[in-house]
Structures are given as structure tokens and as C-alpha cells.
Image (cartoon, grey):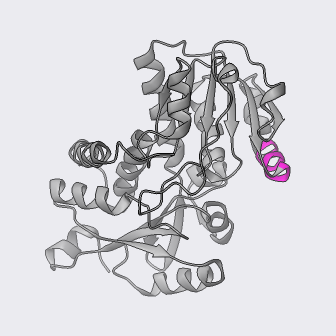
Amino acid sequence: MGSPDESRDLGIIPTTGLLGHNIGYSLSPMLHVAAGEASGRQCDYNLFDIPPEHLDGFLRRVVQFQETLGFNVTTPYKEDVASRFDALHDSAREVGAVNVVALRGDHLIGYNTDRPALASSLRAAIKDGGHPDSGWTVVLLGAGGGARAACWALLDTGLVENLIVSARDPDRIHSIKNDTYFAFTQAQATFSTQKWMDWGTLFVESPAMLINATPLGSADNRGRVPHSSPHPPQRVLKQFSLVLDIVYAPPVTGLMKAARSAGVEAVGGGGMLVEQAVLSRSIWFGEGEEDIERAAMVAAYSSWASKSAAWED
């Protein structure tokens, strides 16, 4: 297969999609359709819902299907895919997780656009809320690919002074700590851990931020929320100046509602979702249409969110 431009000249619509498992809730097809209609860079965006035992087979087959430009990666494969590729872009190698894959000849190359997308969302939230741009204590929930991207985004923005990571699996937390130790040392920032959901012992000083980097609170494709988002008690939430939930569906999660009822600013994952999709398309198609495609995706997500405001977590 030639370049994306050559394929369009031949009337071929290239294939992209999202690799994951139990991902019927995803809004990515909607966003990429909107972006393609706006810019003319259209693709056939599929949901590749692959069980773990078939992951290696899928990766072998996708290389043979030369109409594929690449694909996004979501739970539970962001770290698994990173460990399977010989070719990783610096963005993915440093984070230790892949959320974008590009097919170059017979090679799959892994990238990470979650990191810059989350950094962009953080900068916007800080600016819009008039918050300080450094010296933050951040409580990060989760230790998967999203949490890894969050650690690096916090370092990239220069926001974090003290990071506290809380997750179910202590081994995964220690893995992140080992992988980011040098970067946190250079930034003169601390990295500590907190027992999962142990709100009784959590006390932080302002400015403080809570980030949910777990899928808890996500809605399925029927608008149901099988596992509610983490709900710290009000006295804990009141310690924070800002809450960021990377979950994008429902548009207002249970965590966001609880934070707002405690008088705390809360931001959802819609902005991050759009930005990582914009960056993904720049990898697949090349740069040059970001503004047009971003505007189309924002409009599509906003329209969807307005129709989904009644979803409950």
C-alpha cells in the first residue's frame, strides 16, 4: 500500500480502528467519521474487540492487510502491545504504554498520544480555573497505561511537586515508580503510594489535584455504568482544588458530580479523548488538518454529550 494520499487517489478508503476488549462503549468511530467528513481524510474506523488469547493472531493478520493505516489501542492492551513491538516511538518507549499503532511497510510502530493529550487537558484546566502552574500535590488513581501517561504528562507540564499513586495492584505501582524514578528525581518531585481507597488516612495540602486514570465509572454501549467511579467522601474531596476524570462516557461521571457537590472544580475526559484522536490522525495521515479535525470532533462529542446528560453513574 502506498501513502494515504495515493490510496485516496485510487479510491481506496484506508482502514483504521480501535484495538481492545469489551469496547462497545467507544466513541472513537463517531469522532473519526466526523473528522474525515470535515477534512476529506476519511477512513473505515472499526472496533477490533479481541479477546486476550487472540491478540497475537490479530497483530499478525493486521500486518498482512495492507489497507490498514494503523489503529488505536485501549484497555486492556496498552502495556501488552508495548511489550510485543520491536519498534516503539520515543513517546511510547518512555511511557511504557502504546495507544496508537502505525503500519509502516511490514512493521507495526507503537506511539503514545495519551501523554500529550492529557498534558493539553491539564494545561487548559489550570488556565481556565486560574490555578497555579506548579507546586501541586496530585493523587493519581490507577496504575495502568492511562496512569503511566498521566505521570509523564504531570512531569511534562511541570505541575507536580508530590505524586501519590493509589491502585489495587501494588506491583504495578512499583513498576511505574521504577520507570519514572530518574525523571521525578530530575524534577525534584516526590513519588509515594497510598493504599487503594484508603481515604481515611489521606490528607493533602493545597494546591491539590485528584486524577482518576482508571476505567471505573465508564458507561457501556447501552448507557449503563457497571462499575461506579471512585467516590471519596466529601471531607476528602474538599481538600482538592481540581478533579480530573479521564473517563469520557458518561460526559459527567459520578466522581465529577461528587466533586462539584463539594464545591470542587471537575473536568472530564472528553478533551483528552479528542486530542489523542487528533494526534493519532496526524500519525496516520500526516500533519496539516489538525484544527479542522479537532473542531469537527469537539462538535461531535458535544452533540453526543448533550443527548447523554441524563446518564447516571
Horizontal side, residue 40 vs residue 48: left or right? left
Q: Residue at x 55, y 56 (%)?
A: 89
Q: Quadrant of the N terminus?
A: bottom left
Q: Nearer the viewer, residue 304 or 74?
A: 304
Q: Residue at x 79, y 41 (%)?
A: 196
Estimate the x, y position of residue 161 in percent, counting from the top left.
70, 21
On whether residue 177 falls in the magenta region, the answer is yes
Evaluate whether residue 288 shows in this view: no
Vertically, is 304 above or below 2? above
Span highlighted in magenta in the image:
170-178
Horizontal side, residue 69 vs residue 243: left or right? left
Evaluate whether residue 73 shows in this view: yes
Q: Residue at x 57, y 59 (%)?
A: 98
Q: Nearer the viewer, residue 283 or 197?
A: 197
Estimate the x, y position of residue 33 in percent, counting from the top left.
25, 61
Vertically, is 10 above or below 119? below
Vertically, is 214 above or below 139? below
Horizontal side, residue 172 vs residue 215: left or right? right
